[in-house]
Image (tube, rainbow, N blue to C red):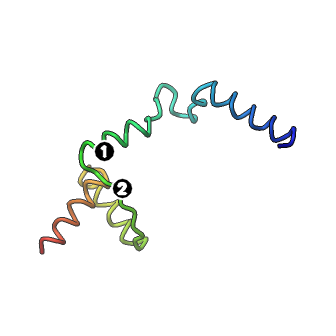
Amino acid sequence: MKRTDLAKADAKKLQHQQGPRALPSGTAGAQLPDRREQRERDRALGLVPFAVKLNGDLVKQLQALAQERGVDMNALVAEVLQKGLAA
């Protein structure tokens, strides 16, 4: 390993030891969610990540409907899929 590679590795270790980075502007007292904890909560609820590619117009319709109903996108898509599969 080169000396520069060693120096880079040491710098990364130091950054990791310093803890979380500063929060993005506009989020001054908010904490970023811990991804591991969020995955555990989702798993306990029986949720499974499921990625799909949809047409942009369809996504806009879903976003508008979710905002209109005041629900999050996950709940709306689950509801729409359940109704579609039941039909």
Taking 38 as reference, is 71 left or right?
left
Residue 79 image point, x, y percent: 20, 60
Residue 68 image point, x, y percent: 27, 55
Q: Nearer the viewer, residue 54 or 65?
A: 54
Taking 45 as reference, is 31 left or right?
right
Q: Is residue 28 above or below residue 65?
A: above
Picture quarter with the N terminus: top right
Taking the spot 31% from the left edge, 39% from the top edge, the residue there is: 41
CB under 8 Å between callouts 2 and 1?
A: yes
The residue beneath circle 2 is 49
Binning the other alpha carbons within 10 Å of mark 1 as few (below 14), some (14 to 19) or many (20 upward) gives few
Q: Nearer the viewer, residue 26 or 32?
A: 32
Taking 86 as reference, is 32 left or right?
right
Taking the spot 17% from the left edge, 71% from the top edge, the residue there is: 85
Residue 14 image point, x, y percent: 70, 27
Binning the other alpha carbons within 10 Å of mark 2 as few (below 14), some (14 to 19) or many (20 upward) gives few
